[in-house]
């Protein structure tokens, strides 16, 4: 996701957050300094061995207690709404998702185990899963509770301890979340540090950190990977995306437009797997675009509309739109910055887009639907794949052979056919290309949070005796 920010720093020591709906101050928090970061990591190192030795079912019970506490923390959703502009119902949904993640990890942790291996009949061979140790968890602002809790829960249930740095755009949510969860855990198992990128660099560059989990921009993710190459930390990262939607011939154009609108405009385009570019078959393009324009205009006519996270991010979104308009695109809905307080931006539909436009090449992360018309499915698939990101992609088609081709040819973590935001519970995607590395959720995330040792065990020879049943004896 994109990495612009509007939080302001006073002498590089504080963050001030502005409500993107009203333009009012939410509050100011202090940035952690080097001494506080060092003290936090020192405590984490001290308590981690004891937490790792805690029976898995006891760790699970602690996570269930944390889930109970999170479910009762109604003020988190309201605070999220004030800091990021996320609608209250969606913010509550994020809290509910966090509760579910805690309960899932509470149950999966005790079941997370190694495998038995086939070896000598007089020996035992098996693999043993161990926690990495200290986990630095760096999380984004667009779904600050659900994403953070998912990573924290997987780390804690497997015996790691966590130092969490929330985004500088929602530090108040991060602080409150840490207070709610840490009350259910032993002292030091979960700690929170607030601040900007400098605080993140303190954590990711410290050799006392054993595993880093990051959700955020590709630029930051690349910096983290470089730091981890020096420290030896294991890295799990979900970074930027430029997710394509290919709309094939033969589908209902109105239904297809509703899927594109959901993908482009839900949470004002601020979802990690939002649709960022649309390739529509020429045979249905006119009806598709008309329906998409109608959907955008309906959204823009609503009396209360969701803002993007802040004005700096709005500037980023509008710059992409302006560049496209300058080189030949047309805004048939939206495309202008509204007057008044806050950081609102309209649902925008751009037609006449070409592959060289910034809005088609880079992650906009806003409520923009750039549409490029293609002559056939093969062209749409080729353009969808020709991108440096590989997070997810969507195909709308009535043809099974085209669905199978997309599953094979699109090198992305998630290929979605005929539904832009659906999926079975427990699924786990592995980002491709510049979108990251490692499984960021699902049962496989527990594997990312642990290392594997192979154990070989056989009987020793003792004085005056032999190993029981040497090969060939007893027959």
Image (cartoon, helix red, strand yellow):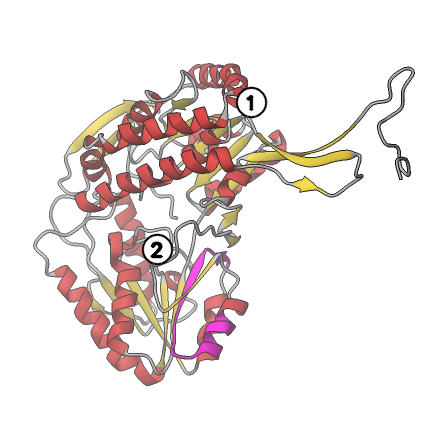
Q: Can you give x and y, in whole percent of width and height, for residue 275 in the image?
A: 35, 61
Q: Can you give x and y, in whole percent of width and height, for residue 118 in the image?
A: 74, 43
**Residue situated in front as seen by the camera: 356 or 91:** 91
Q: Quick check: 66 above or below 432?
A: above
Per the model, the C-alpha gap separating discs 2 and 1 is 35 Å
Nearer to us of marks 2 and 1 is: 1
Residue for point 10% across, 51% down: 304
The part of the image, by quadrant, that contains residue 103 is top left
Mark seen at residue 364: 2
Q: Residues within 10 Å of mark 1 (few under 14, many from 20)?
A: many
- Helix, strand or loop at label 1? It is loop
Residue 418 visible from this viewpoint: yes
Q: Which residue is mark 1?
A: 208
The residue range painted magenta reads 388-406
Residue for point 55% across, 18% down: 49
**Residue situated in front as seen by the camera: 22 or 272:** 272
């Amino acid at each position: 996701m994109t990495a612009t920010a509007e939080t302001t720093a006073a002498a590089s020591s504080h963050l001030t957050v502005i409500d993107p709906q009203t333009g009012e101050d939410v509050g100011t928090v202090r940035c952690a300094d080097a001494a506080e970061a060092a003290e936090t990591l020192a405590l984490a190192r001290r308590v981690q061995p004891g937490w790792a030795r805690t029976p898995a079912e006891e760790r699970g019970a602690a996570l269930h207690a944390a889930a109970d506490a999170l479910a009762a923390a109604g003020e988190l959703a309201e605070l999220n709404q004030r800091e990021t502009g996320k609608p209250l119902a969606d913010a509550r949904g994020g809290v509910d998702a966090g509760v579910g993640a805690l309960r899932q990890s509470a149950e999966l942790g005790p079941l997370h185990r190694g495998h038995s291996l086939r070896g000598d009949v007089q020996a035992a061979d098996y693999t043993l899963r161990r926690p990495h140790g200290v986990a630095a968890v760096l999380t984004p602002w667009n779904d600050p509770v659900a994403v953070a809790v998912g990573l924290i829960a997987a780390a804690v249930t497997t015996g790691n301890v966590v130092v969490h740095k929330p985004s500088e755009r929602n530090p108040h949510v991060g602080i409150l979340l840490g207070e709610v969860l840490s009350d259910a855990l032993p002292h030091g198992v979960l700690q929170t540090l607030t601040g900007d990128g400098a605080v993140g660099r303190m954590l990711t560059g410290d050799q006392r950190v054993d595993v880093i989990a990051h959700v955020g921009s590709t630029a930051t993710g690349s910096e983290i990977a470089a730091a981890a190459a020096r420290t030896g930390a294991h890295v799990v990262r979900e970074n930027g995306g430029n997710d394509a939607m290919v709309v094939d011939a033969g589908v209902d154009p109105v239904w297809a437009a509703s899927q594109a609108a959901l993908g482009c405009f839900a949470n004002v385009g601020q979802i990690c797997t939002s649709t960022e570019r649309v390739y529509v078959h020429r045979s249905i393009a006119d009806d598709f675009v008309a329906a998409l324009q109608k959907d955008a205009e309906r959204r823009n006519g609503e009396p209360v509309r969701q803002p993007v996270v802040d004005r700096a991010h709005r500037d980023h979104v509008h710059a992409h739109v302006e560049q496209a308009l300058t080189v030949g695109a047309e805004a048939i809905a939206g495309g202008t910055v509204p007057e008044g307080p806050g950081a609102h931006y309209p649902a925008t539909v751009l037609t006449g887009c070409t592959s060289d436009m910034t809005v088609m090449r880079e992650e906009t992360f806003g409520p923009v639907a750039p549409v490029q018309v293609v002559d056939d499915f093969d062209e749409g698939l080729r353009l969808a794949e020709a991108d440096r990101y590989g997070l997810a992609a969507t195909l709308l088609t009535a043809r099974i052979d085209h669905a199978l081709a997309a599953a094979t040819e699109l090198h992305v973590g998630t290929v979605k056919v005929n539904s832009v935001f659906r999926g079975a519970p427990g699924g786990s995607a592995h980002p491709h290309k510049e979108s990251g590395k490692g499984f960021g959720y699902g049962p496989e995330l527990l594997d990312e949070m642990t290392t594997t040792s192979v154990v070989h065990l056989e009987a020793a020879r003792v004085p005056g005796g032999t190993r029981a049943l040497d090969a060939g004896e007893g027959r």
